[in-house]
Amino acid sequence: MSGAVIRVLIVEDHQVVADGLAALLNDQPDITVVGTTSSISESVSLAHELGPDVALVDFRLTDGTGADAGTRIRQVRPETKLIFLTREDSDAVRFAALEAGASAFIHKSRAASEVVDAVRVVAGGGSLITPRTIATLLDRRRTMDSELESLTSREKEVLRLMADGMSSRDIARRLGISYTTVRTHIRSLGSKLGVHSKLEAIVKARELALVE
């Protein structure tokens, strides 16, 4: 990319954030924002029409995830590098980004200068995801897959409802089963996943992508 202007597509469903990113990047002499959008379908169309070097993608969009957007963008424009922005710092989000072909993922709390630096690095063919990070994520993913496979369909339902903040009696009423049966499922979840509270249920359900 030496001497060339880096062309960036912003996919972000919060207009204020999108405008801020556009202003930040357009202020750089070697970067220009060629388009902004908040939808997955339009991001694919713009990627095809405008040929961005980098797509800066919010991981949570109103019509899907950034991983969905990134995967479809790279189907029509394989050369486009992906940088994901997220407020979530979870293995599930990082692994989804990795599967979509991410060259970087940046937490939204990080300094604006990091976004600019990341755009330059990935546009030049680099990556901010180290081999060690990839290996760690793959190892954790195998663990999560094993945990998920260990659960029965009913245990998954109970875990989702626990993560929604429902009490054991509310879960029993919702599923049409006895309170004792719900407690049995929760004990089983505790044994398999180490889940013993609503907070732990929320964390684990998100890790296993059973809830958003």
Image: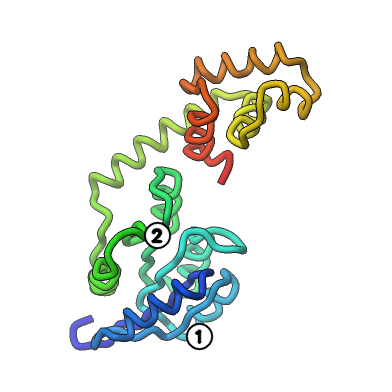
Q: Residues within 10 Å of mark 1 (few under 14, many from 20)?
A: few
Q: Is residue 12 above or below residue 195?
A: below
| Quadrant of the image occupied by residue 87 | bottom left
Q: Is residue 118 above or below residue 167?
A: below
- Which scheme is used to colour this image of the protein? rainbow
Q: In what element is the residue under mark 2?
A: loop
Q: In what element is the residue under mark 1?
A: helix
Q: Residue at x 36, y 82 (%)?
A: 23
Q: Are marks 2 and 1 in contact (CB under 8 Å)?
A: no
| Quadrant of the image occupied by residue 173 | top right
Q: Residue at x 64, y 12 (%)?
A: 184
Q: Is residue 73 above or below residue 94?
A: below
Tell which of 211 and 150 is nearer to you: 211
Residue named by callout 2: 101
Q: Counting residues from the N terminus, which is met first, the one under dot 2 or under dot 1?
A: 1
Identify the amino acid type marked 2.
Gly
Tell me if I can see residue 70 in this picture.
Answer: yes
Residue named by callout 1: 49
Query: Between marks 2 and 1, how big is the CA–CA gap?
Result: 20 Å
Identify the amino acid type marked 1.
Glu
Q: Residue at x 70, y 11 (%)?
A: 180
Q: Residue furthest right?
A: 176
Residue 83 numbered tag: none
Q: Residues within 10 Å of mark 2 (few under 14, many from 20)?
A: some
Q: Residue at x 45, y 51 (%)?
A: 96
